[in-house]
Amino acid sequence: MTEIYPTIAQCAVVATAFKILLFPAYKSTDFEVHRNWLAITHSLPVWEWYYEKTSEWTLDYPPFFAYFEWLLSQVAKLVDPFMLRVYNLEYDSWQTVYFQRFTVIVTELALVYALQMAVDGISRFIDAHHGVPKRAAQAAALSIFLSPGLLIIDHIHFQYNGCMYGILIASLVLAKQKSGLLTSGLVFASLLCMKHIYAYLAPAYVVYLLRAYCLSPKSILRIQFLNCVKLGAGILGILGAAFGPFAVKGQIPQILSRLFPFSRGLCHAYWAPNVWALYSFMDRALISAAPRLGLPVKEEALNSVTRGLVGDTSFAVLPEITPRLCFALTLLFQAIPLVKLFLKPTWDAFIGAVTLCGYASFLFGWHVHEKAILLVIIPFSLIALKDRRHLSAFRPLAVAGHVSLFPLLFTPAEFPIKTVYTIFWLILFLTVFDRLAPPSNRQRFFLFDRFSILYIAVSIPLMAYCSLIHQMVFGKRYEFLPLMFMSSYSAIGVVGSWLGFMVVYFTS
Amino acid sequence: MSSPSPAHKPRRKSKKPGVTFDASTKPGPLIRTPSFPLAAFLWPARSSLSPWEVVPLILMVVGLFRWAAGLWGYSGFQKPPMFGDYEAQRHWMEITTQLPISQWYFHDLEWWGLDYPPLTAYHSWLLGKIGALIDPSWFTLYTSRGSDDPTLKIFMRATVIISEYLIYIPAAVVFVRRYSRLFGVAQWTSWVALVAILLQPSTILIDHIHFQYNTVMLGFVLASMSSMTAGRYMWASIFFVAALGFKQMALYYAPAVFAYLLGSCIFPRINIGRFVVIAGVTAVSFAVLILPLVIGALYDAKRGIDSRPDLDGPRPPLPIFPQLESYLNTEAVYYPVVVQLVQMVHRVFPFARGLFEDKVANFWCAANVVFKLKKYPAALLQRASLVATLASFAPANLILFLRPNKELLPYAFATTAWSFFLFSYQVHEKSVLLPLLPMTVLLAGKQGLGKDVRAWVGFANILGAWTMFPLLQRVDLRVPYAVLTLLWAYLLGLPPTSLSAYFQEGQSPWVQWGTALVHGAFYVAMGLWHVLELFVAAPLDKPDLWVVANVGVGAVGFALCYAWCLWRLTDESGILRWGSVKSSKKTQ
């Protein structure tokens, strides 16, 4: 089998060099969050991990992530023991920065490994077609590995997504073979015990494993009991390993209250580009129109969204949104694709369903963070090159999803990095994808292609306006305006690509 | 052409994607794998014919590396009393925007007085004006000294990148294109060379991390070389004057420029017209260069602004050329101009300083370890330095003069710059950028990505970066040094990451083994030195031991690079094969 160049390992070397150069870059409070967790897991007994609250950044990830931090802290104590003191708030000696940043790079090797697995898996499958599918798989893998999303969130802003998305991809790839289904499910269960945001994708797993592993492929009425027992026991074992020690001490309610803080508002500090961002935008637009239309305007809401964009959003004209409604909408839009997955449990449909579950939770979820867009982009990347129709649904998502991450970095020194890197990635991979995606055997939607071209074209003047022109014209006034434009623009892209992909999913 | 390296075979793959695999299974001499990682990165671009698709992406990537490198500290960050090069550049923006032009070369010389030629001053003026629009406090007179405002740092970093993208990068793109076409090198191969040139570690380390504007000067030099390659002698002269006008260090190339331009007016046949044009354009460019200074001096004199308001009493004598005063009327209208220009020359060429200042990896510094040179009178040393420099650059320039072929330009430029670096007066460790540039552009030439050239260019660059390590580690830049140098070595398949650049087919085993062993010894020495420097403190009575060792190894290595460039120049010029090659040369 001929190697395809550049290899993932080669890219990893160069990307690592770049990421090391970014060590002194801006880091968000998440850096302190993770330092605090290192300190908590290292210096406190297990039973106090979920009760400790010296820092406001309490441990709010599931136990496997806490164990992961404990492992890291074993190395950290050799580097700089002072970072492991719980009271040492905001501690960031250069050793601490180097160490924490370096752990992100090292743990990202999980992603490298998983992507290599994905590419090798493809080549083992499709030997008949030769080069093209493998090249497409390699391009998709590199696009994930070099994703500006991961660069911005992990290596500048600071988080460990690379490692966890690596585990997710490993699990998705394992599901491709019949023999890998059990492992896939168990790997995903472990991932859930590391970061619970992946629960949004769980419905697709449940349906797929149920249909493809627990029920007979011939008939849904024949249950494969042995498989059910294996899967059930495995999942229980993993849950036991994660939560067992805490359950013994009766700490589960406390952990759950940490993991699911329901007191937060509908929109996060910045507006994630979802349906609610469009809803807020409409609400703002209606404020000026309301007197003419004779609609009542709630006075107390007028000053909330326009200013800080922080905390609870309340709407002036449109009705309030409740968490219950968000939950119901999310479930509804997750359920629709799952029906098809249940009827036709192929791997492609599974990945499509995972992607659509990600979409639904991102678009309709309560208190969605813009970082969650990776939950959609990364699974989608695995099938974006299936044919041109998939690609045309992927394109606006790639643009919107990455552009919507820009507000995460607001310091001028990082501005060129986030913009140039994202533009580089978009040009490179959208051109490469365009060449590699095979034509579809079905009719393309004329309008959708036009929409996606127009959409991408708009991004350039919009970015220029938001990053430069607005400041020059208005200075510090109307600061919310660029943010609102960006998030509405991105929301249109995400919603558009969601609709487009829904159609592709149901017609292929 | 004997078996070219695989990197020279790009066009073959430009087929429809579906059939490529059939081709790869065909037996034969086709090597279908990139021979070093950088070629692998551009591998998918082989079928791409348009530079408009590839070059912008290349420029974005090298820009990202530059900006990311710039996040690290600069020289003299929070290091009073004098801070460093960053402060010097900022200070020049301050004085050029705040003072009348006639005081630029006179103002408070103890605090980073302006000692670069006028184009730097104009450049600083422009940047200072732009910066003052953002925040005037960055450049207020006196109070802004040693400023470490983080936004100012971003502004300054941005000015380096923008200046580079306006001058150096276009010059490099055009030069690589023209120079590679001379040898019929394929477009794809020239892109690989372009990335290698633009990611050269020492340039990024000095300009974007340590902080200077060398790429502006180097860009003008490249533009000049590129114009020479295209046969545009007028533009070559203008660009070279601009390079000299930006940084006097461009003089390192001056003999080669002179030899080439003069040679091309005489050989193969005498061309008086060309000579007149070159001479005239050069004179006019110099005049334009100093014109603002002249007009400023006259205008300020008319307004009654003294160039040295801090001095009372009679006018001080001229700092150099005092004999001029007896010939000229010191009360005449033109006299302020004379004072201005003499002062400028005096500032730009510090004749009064010693043979060397810091520890530099050149001949004098290395020789000083063995014989204490300080016991000799300064005048003798100056003369020795002059003779040595002249003697070392003479052969190369004689060849270039007799055989003014554009193919030889980088070799001649590199050899001449190496002579200056090794033997001239008042050399700075940063000056190694000058010989490195023409040597590195060899990658775009004939067999440029073949093993031999790659091994030597790589050796010079890695050694060059290594000799700058003492300078960089003073401000804690070990990490970017290691990252950028190792990355470049990795991309080009060089030690310490790979041995793939050695044992070129077709060379005699003596040369193959000789190169590999000599280079190997240097790489081992460099690695060992880093280990020692990191873990072993220098003995108390010899605190500079590591630096001296660095200088000694560096000087020997650079002398080898000089010898290699000179040998290649001689070989390529065919001057030693006088009789046999003469006829074929004529037809060129």
Image (spheres, coloured by chain):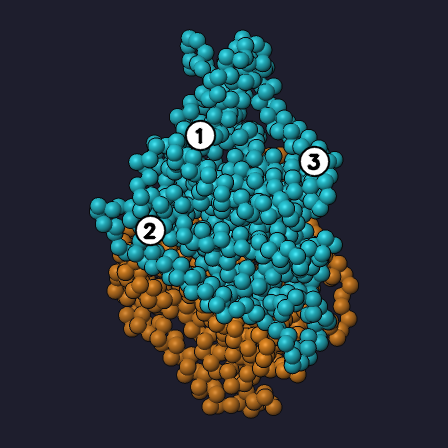
Chain colours: A orange, B cyan
Per the image, label 2 sits on a secondary structure element best described as helix
Which residue reaches farthest left? B540
* Structural crowding at the residue carrying mark 2, measured as other residues with C-alpha within 10 Å and reported as few (<14), some (14–19) or many (≥20): some
In this rendering, position of residue A102 left or right of residue B404: left
Chain hosting mark 1: B
Q: Which mark is residue B549?
A: 2
Q: Which mark is residue B350?
A: 1
Residue B146: x %, y % from top left: 40, 32
Residue B505: x %, y % from top left: 55, 70
Choose mark 2 or mark 3, whichever is in front.
3
The quarter of the displayed image where residue B376 is located: top left
Q: Tell which of A440 and B582 is nearer to you.
A: B582
Q: Which residue is under mark 3? A: B275
* Residues at marks 1 and 2 on the same chain: yes
Inspect this view and state whether residue A1 appears: yes
Residue A150: x %, y % from top left: 51, 59
